[in-house]
Image: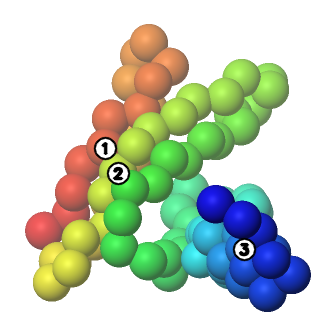
Amino acid sequence: MRMTTSSRADFHILKELITKRWRTNLAGSSGGDGSIGFRGFHGDFEVEVTLPGGKTAKANFSVKPNSANQYRLKLNSSGAFEVVEEK
């Protein structure tokens, strides 16, 4: 494949869309009830939370079309998250 000036420009535009605009990045602190909300595209997500003391916990969930897409992440006794879909 031969890259032309035009195809390089197209590549950079597409790369910007995929790595920045179409990606959901969220950083913040939870409220007093421990909750945080966000809006994201349909797809698979990974959440990483920094707990008091600096330890981190991760969980994966999916945002699906035509679904409530409300989840509760519960920290279990081993320090890992359980993802519970709210109905």
Q: Position of residue 54 (x, y in %)?
A: 80, 26
Q: Position of residue 57 (x, y in %)?
A: 57, 30
- Distance of mark 2 from mark 1, alpha carbons? 7 Å
At x 73%, y 79%, the residue is 7
Q: Which residue is mark 1?
A: 83
The reply to whether dot 2 and dot 1 touch (C-beta < 8 Å) is: yes
- Distance of mark 2 from mark 3, alpha carbons? 30 Å
Closest to the observer: 73 or 13? 13
Mark 1 or 3, closer to the camera: 3
Q: Which residue is mark 2?
A: 61
Q: Which residue is mark 3?
A: 11
Residue 64 in which image quadrant:
bottom left
- Distance of mark 1 from mark 3, alpha carbons? 36 Å
Q: Is residue 7 above or below residue 75?
A: below
**How many residues crowd mark 2 within 10 Å: few (<14), some (14–19), many (20+)?**
some
Mark 2 or 3, closer to the camera: 3
